[in-house]
Image (cartoon, rainbow, N blue to C red):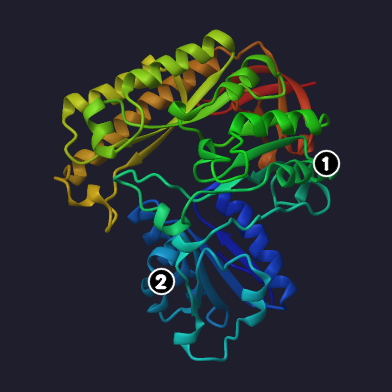
Amino acid sequence: MRTPADSLAVVTFGCRLNTIESEAIRRAASAAGHDNVVVFNTCAVTKEAVRQARQAIRRAHREQPDTRIVVTGCAAQIEPDTFAEMPEVAAVIGNAEKTRSSTWQALDFGISASLRTRVNDIMSLPVTAHHFVAGEGIDAIEGHTRAFVEIQNGCDHRCTFCIIPYGRGPSRSSPMGDVVEQIGRLVANGYREAVLTGVDITSYGHDLPGRPDLGRLVKNILRHVPELERLRLSSIDCIEADDALLDIIATEPRFMPHLHLSLQAGDDMILKRMKRRHARAHAIKFCADIRTIRPDMVFGADIIAGFPTETEDMFARSLDLVEECGLTHLHVFPYSPRQGTPAARMPQVPGPLIKERSARLRAKGAERLSAHLDRQIGRRLQVLGERGGIGRAEDFSPVRIGEAARGRIVEATITGHNGAVLECLAA
């Protein structure tokens, strides 16, 4: 990784929420006059994510030893000393502080290293900081033609494998009016599609006056921003989908036919040990019910391979769940113990077995995706062009559409695929 001299760069790891916040960081740091700085906005979801961040920091320092390195994000929030002790790092900033203009205005690289660590107790945050980015044109969120909009942050649940609540704090929601106004500005600046994102978006509104739910927010967005052509959700818990959201899914064509589910496992005992809020039957019934009201719906899901105590039979039920739920876009996570979580103290599955099960899940996911792409051949799809010449169809299938389509929705006739990406003739 290289950055121009006398420049400011933000390197983003992890989730879409970090993508939004990286843009807010870039703007705040730039306004404060910082240059020759690289900010690493880190992820902590696995030990591997932390390792990759540390590796990238060392590489950046080797390539540009005079560049000042700032580390922030979930890994910095949870493990500030890990990064503060790295000789390559000039400052460590917590999640609560990273997007505030005052943080970057006060940052002084000339003071002692101990004073350059600003990480406060994120669990005490009463409200969320609204990282709304409007900007000008479709590059308001740098490099993206789909607008990611933060509607919620933090999590009140305590899944036994997950460290993220300690990096993000309690669940906090953005007021509906603010979200609607933000999306209206983004559409006015050229965005065709908005993606509602957060840490646990199905908990949206529980902390707001009147306790509005996610479905009500979605209805208000579509009602008050009629120019918005496409709306998506990032990831949801199927057990928490409210009636208003189901009504939108059934009746609103601007709500895209793709849902990504936080399933994590297909065995009830493992789900119980994970402290998840749904059972296997809930996931299967949810997918079947949604397909009844929206036959074109496509599902993705997160699944963890090798959770502590997972036997071969338990893992087989996760493999079977891919078929029973009809999953198409699979995100596979090899289990990684995180210090401070209950799962880290449970009997662990051997590393090579975790790796082998992850490979089997990925192979199943690739098989399901290829079968889905087969069914698209000959169809005419509406595709939103993104960077790199790849676009997304309404069901989130990737399509090689060409750089000329970037930021536009074009009709494309599908001619084939390479197992992962559709090929087409653009209209």
Residue at 75%, 42% (x, y): give it. 183
* Farthest right residue in view: 188
Q: Provide residue 112's location: percent of width, then percent of height.
A: 49, 91
Residue under label 1, please give it: 190
**Which element carries disc 2, helix, strand or loop?**
helix
The answer to which of 103 and 365 lies nearer the viewer is: 103
Q: Is residue 2 above or below residue 414?
A: below
The answer to which of 313 and 156 lies nearer the viewer is: 156
- The image quadrant of residue 221 is top right
Between the C-alphas of marks 2 and 1, the distance is 39 Å
Residue at 29%, 45% (x, y): give it. 160
Type of amino acid under label 2: Pro
Residue under label 2, please give it: 80
Q: Provide residue 349's location: percent of width, then percent of height.
A: 17, 42
**Which element carries disc 1, helix, strand or loop?**
loop
The disc, 2 or 1, on the residue closer to the chain's N-terminal end is: 2
